[in-house]
Image (cartoon, rainbow, N blue to C red):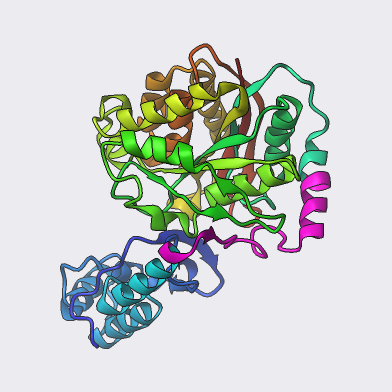
Amino acid sequence: MSILRPRLRPVETIVVPDERYGQAVVLRDTEGVTPKVASIPGPLFPVLARFTGALTIEQIAAEATAELGVAISAGIVRKLARDLDEALFLESPRYQAERSRVEAEFVRSPVRHATHAGGAYHADPAKLKAYLTHDCLGSAGPKEKNGQVRGLVAPHIDPWRGKRGYGHAYGLLGAGLRQEVDTFVLLGTSHAPMREPFALCRKTFATPLGGIEVDDGAVDAIAERSPFDPFTDVFNHKREHSLEFQAVFVKHLMGEKPARIIPILCGIGESQRTGRCPQDDPRSEPFLNAVRAVVERHAHRTVVIAGADLAHVGPRFGDPAAYDVQQRKRLERIDRASLELAAEQAHRDFFFHVQGDLDSRRVCGLGPIYALLRALPDGCRGQLEHYEQTIDPQEGSIVSHAAMAFYG
């Protein structure tokens, strides 16, 4: 079936170096409909940018030709559209049919499988245990107990690059974990678009170290008080790594001890776009109040964890060049200022501080950190243990992240 007006569906786009063309755009599916990855060379950027569904193949070719000053034929545009459609990156009947099939399969399954095992971390249990123990927790060193940990901010970058950050975060949690704790509220960024502000999931989270069951009673209690259907976007859980990585570390930390999770994906997309604090949103605020009620009801045995990275800057994320030393120092100052507001549980100030430069700093952990601040009981105080800028060795792009524990 030919695509008359190609429209790229919402996917992750990353600019990467390319030996032949200088740059390429890599497309990756964050929903989990297709495992394929597409790479678009630099000269075709103007073509891809016009895959909005508004223009015909011929119109795209004409506009791209005018922009580049080089002839781009309708045949080239048509081939790109066909290739992307076959790879399921376009909004099309082919994609809709496959999404329906995959989504139905996911909904039927009682298990949320460890989709990143063998890629972002070891799939072999023995190797994974050794890596988490020695490379992650071992790299951060032993932690002193500073009181009961009520909340935690941890990275959600892959554990290969974020091993020290994870080590500091889960080292703090291990040192401040009360014997009674058996429930973890996991808050993660949804990297795929969401229709509602938050998404719950009832499925057991599989890990190479064993599964972690969901606290069904708590999930039901939150769902009953939610002003929207919190399972509308449950499919976003299928491949979302921000929660999967936390589940792996929690399972490692708890070992054979009983543990349950309450997995919540945070979108708050409308608040991020409009600059309206989620506290003033008639959908977000009742949902977070319901989460807070669950946490307060079992405060002695519940910990809230936000899987949240901070800034995403540099060529990979659309900036013209890598940050120099002074820009990196300035970025650290801004990141730390955001984290200090979080440490004080100043949730509104934190939201506006991050939302104000969201287009340039690109903090993808705004949703889960904000939700953590609203879910924790009043009076908790955050303590920043570790801040890090992970720098791409090839082109210098940066993902910053932190480890922070909340005590109370």
Q: Nearer the viewer, residue 79 or 383?
A: 383
Q: How many marks?
A: 0
**Which residue extends farthest front?**
217
| Residue 226 screen position, x and y as percent | 31, 36
Answer with left or right where residue 295 lies relative to residue 301. left
When the figure is inspected, residue 268 is found, relative to residue 142, above or below; the finding is below
Quarter of image, res 125:
bottom right
Please say whether residue 325 is visible from this viewpoint: no
Q: Residue at left 47%, top 39%?
A: 217
When the figure is inspected, residue 315 is found, relative to residue 83, above or below; the finding is above
Please say whether residue 266 is visible from this viewpoint: yes
Give the position of the N terminus as an image quadrant. bottom left
Give the position of the C terminus as an image quadrant. top right
Quarter of image, res 210:
bottom right
Q: Residue at left 31%, top 76%?
A: 97
**Which residue extends farthest top?**
379
| Residue 150 screen position, x and y as percent | 60, 23
Q: Is residue 112 magenta?
A: yes
What's the magenta region?
Answer: 107-135
Answer with left or right where residue 355 lies relative to residue 283. right
| Residue 86 screen position, x and y as percent | 37, 82
Q: Is residue 113 magenta?
A: yes
Q: Nearer the viewer, residue 199 or 267?
A: 199
When the figure is inspected, residue 177 is found, relative to residue 16, above or below; the finding is above
| Residue 199 screen position, x and y as percent | 39, 46
